[in-house]
Amino acid sequence: MTFIPRDNPSKFTLQGSNTYLVGSGPRRFLIDTGEGGRKAWTEALEKVLREEGVRAIEGVLLTHWHPDHVGGVGDVRGVCRRVFGGGGEEVEVEVFKNQSRPGQKGERGIVDGQVFRTADDDDDDGGTTLRAFYCPGHAVDHMAFVLEEEGAVFTGDNVLGHGTAVFEDLAAYMRSLEGMVGLFGRGAKADSAAGRAYPGHGEVIEDGKEKVREYIAHRKEREGQILDALKGLATGSAGRTAGQDDGGSDGQRSSSSMDVVKVVYKDYPENLWVPAEGGVVQVLRKLEGEGRVRLVENGNWKLAEGEKSSL
C-alpha cells in the first residue's frame, strides 16, 4: 500500500486529503482522489505508478461524495492516459461510489459487502482484496473499505487521524461506528498491520478498533453533557441565562440550542459557540428520535416525559 498525500491543507482537511494506492502487484486500487487540480499530487501519483511498474488501476474507490475526496477523478484519468495510454490515447478507468452520480463517466455503484479484488500471476502476494462497508453518518453515501490481507480499514472521514469527525446524521453515525468496531483485524495475514486504520485525513492509526471505541465514548459523553445541560436549564439551576418560561403547563422551561451551547461550552471561546451549535442540534435531534427530548412550537427544546422524572 502506498500513501499519496494531497497538498490541500486547511482547517477542514487537516494536513490534506489522504489517498491510497492499494496492492503490491501490477494492478492496483486507488482509494479517493482528493481535490482536483493539484499538480503536486498528480505528479506524485504518476511517479509511483511508473517506479513500481503498475500496469493498470483496477478501480478508483470513493469513500463519499465530498469534493476533497472525489474532485481529482479527472486528474486520475489524465495520469492513466499518460502512464498507460502509450501515445496518449484514452484509458478506461472504472470509478466506484455508493449512490453513484448520474452522468459521471465510468462511475458505478457500490453496495454494502461488495468485494473488490486483483489477482495477477506475477503478484507475489496473490492479489489484494477490499470489502466495502456501508457506514453513513459523516455523509449519507459513506463507505469504508476493509483490506482483508491486513485486517486494516480505510475509514474515510468517519474516523480521522487527528481530532474527531463531523457528521450530518448523528444517529446513523453512531450505528456506523458500532459496526466498524468489528471490522479491524478480521482475516488478517499480516499481524503488524492488523487493526490499523487508514483515515481520510491525518496520520495512520495503529489501533483502529481502540480509536473507534474512543470516538463512541466521546460522543456518548457529549450526549450526556447536553442532556444534563437541558435538565439544568429546565429547572433554572444552570444559571440566570437558563431556558425560557414559555407558559407551558408542565412547569418546565424550554431552551434553545444556543442556550445549551452556552452551558456545555462555557469554558470555550465564544467565537466557537456558533460552530458548536450545529453539533448540539444533531445531538438534540438524535435524542428526539429516541423519545428523550421534544421540540416545542417556539423552536426550543424540552425534556420528554420519561426524562422529566430525573429532574
Image: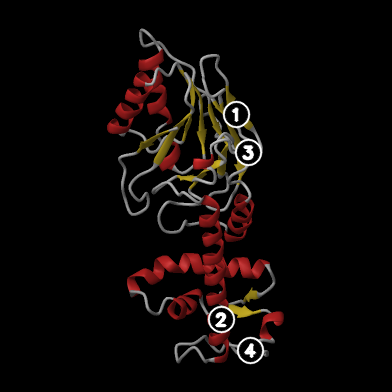
The kind of residue on which mark 1 rests is: Phe
| Residue holding disc 1 | 116
Residue 2 percent coordinates (x, y): 41, 32
Q: Residue furthest left?
A: 40
Mark 1–mark 2 CB contact (< 8 Å): no
Left or right for 171, reference 88: right
- Mark 3 is surrounded, within 10 Å at the Cα level, by few (under 14), some (14 to 19) or many (20 or more) other residues, namely some
| Residue holding disc 4 | 311
| Residue holding disc 3 | 187
> Mark 1 vs mark 3: which is more N-terminal?
1
User: Is residue 176 at least partly visible in the picture?
Assistant: yes
> Mark 1 vs mark 2: which is more N-terminal?
1
| Residue holding disc 2 | 228
Residue 11 percent coordinates (x, y): 33, 54
Residue 213: image quadrant is: bottom right
Q: CA distance from mark 1 to mark 2?
A: 46 Å
Mark 1–mark 3 CB contact (< 8 Å): no
The kind of residue on which mark 2 rests is: Asp
**Vertical order, 2 against 91 (above or below):** below
> Mark 4 vs mark 2: which is more N-terminal?
2
> Mark 4 vs mark 1: which is more N-terminal?
1
- Mark 2 is surrounded, within 10 Å at the Cα level, by few (under 14), some (14 to 19) or many (20 or more) other residues, namely some
The kind of residue on which mark 3 rests is: Gly
The kind of residue on which mark 4 rests is: Leu
Residue 33 percent coordinates (x, y): 42, 34
